[in-house]
Every structure is written in structure tokens, then in C-alpha cells.
């Protein structure tokens, strides 16, 4: 099954695409011109401040803030499960 997402202006049939070669009966591109790249989820390791909005200027402060925000989020989710 093809999970690729294509832009709205993609022709219904590849034969109508600008990059299709009628003589060779194939596309001249390696990847479809109309394919939209899939977004990859980026996983950050502990101590990596690239995912933290506060870690741009100082890694130490960013890591500490990110850790505190994550701990707060976990505690709020636990309290929400108790009905508080």
C-alpha cells in the first residue's frame, strides 16, 4: 500500500505529467515531482535542548526548564486521572 501523499495538482495519470517520457514509457524523475515529503518525528535524548524553546541561549537552563515542564505535565496527567 502506498502511504505517500501527493500535492493536489498532481495529474490523475503519470502520462500527463511534464516529466513523463513517452518514448521510453517512464518518468524521467527518480522520485515523483508531486510527492510531499513525509514529516519525521524527531526524538530528543535527555539533556538535548533542541526540542526546548528555552534552550536556544543556554543549554543548561534549557534542559532544566524542559525537565521541569515534562515533570509538571506528567503530574497534571496523573492528577487528571484521579478526578482532580
Image (cartoon, grey):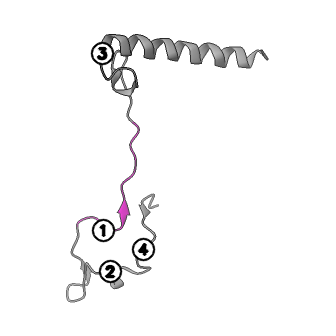
Whether pointer 3 and pointer 2 mark residues with C-beta atoms closer than 8 Å, the reply is no
Q: Going from the N terminus, do you reach mark 3 or mark 4 first?
A: 4
Cα gap from disc 1 to disc 3, whole angstroms = 40 Å
Instruction: Say which quadrant the C terminus sits in.
Output: top right
The image shows residue 22 at horizontal and vertical percentages of: 24, 88
Q: Please tell me how crowded label 3 is: few (under 14), some (14-19), or many (20+) other residues with Cα within 10 Å.
A: few
Give the residue displayed 42% in from the left and 66% down from the top.
Answer: 7
Q: Main secondary structure of the magenta part?
A: loop
Cα gap from disc 4 to disc 1, whole angstroms = 11 Å
The residue beneath circle 4 is 9
The image shows residue 31 at horizontal and vertical percentages of: 27, 64
- The reply to whether the magenta stretch includes residue 37 is yes
Cα gap from disc 3 to disc 2, whole angstroms = 49 Å
Q: Going from the N terminus, do you reach mark 1 or mark 2 first?
A: 2
Q: Going from the N terminus, do you reach mark 3 or mark 2 first?
A: 2
**Nearest to viewer (mark 3 / mark 4):** 3
**Nearest to viewer (mark 1 / mark 3):** 3
Q: Please tell me how crowded label 4 is: few (under 14), some (14-19), or many (20+) other residues with Cα within 10 Å.
A: few
Q: Going from the N terminus, do you reach mark 4 or mark 1 first?
A: 4
Whether pointer 1 and pointer 2 mark residues with C-beta atoms closer than 8 Å, the reply is yes
User: Along the horizontal axis of the image, is 8 left or right of 82?
Assistant: left
> In the structure shown, which secondary structural element does the residue marked by tag 1 occupy?
loop
User: Along the horizontal axis of the image, is 84 left or right of 76?
Assistant: right
Q: Going from the N terminus, do you reach mark 2 or mark 4 first?
A: 4
The residue beneath circle 3 is 58
The residue beneath circle 2 is 17
The magenta stretch spans which residues? 30-41
Q: Please tell me how crowded label 2 is: few (under 14), some (14-19), or many (20+) other residues with Cα within 10 Å.
A: some
- The reply to whether the magenta stretch includes residue 25 is no
Label total for image: 4
The residue beneath circle 1 is 33
Amino acid at each position: 500500500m502506498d502511504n505517500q501523499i501527493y500535492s493536489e495538482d498532481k495529474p490523475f495519470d503519470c502520462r500527463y505529467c511534464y516529466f513523463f517520457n513517452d518514448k521510453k514509457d517512464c518518468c524521467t524523475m527518480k522520485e515523483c515531482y508531486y510527492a510531499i515529503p513525509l514529516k519525521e518525528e524527531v526524538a530528543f535524548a535527555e539533556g538535548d535542548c533542541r526540542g526546548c524553546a528555552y534552550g536556544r541561549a543556554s543549554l543548561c537552563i534549557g534542559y532544566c526548564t524542559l525537565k521541569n515542564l515534562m515533570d509538571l505535565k506528567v503530574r497534571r496527567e496523573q492528577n487528571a486521572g484521579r478526578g482532580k
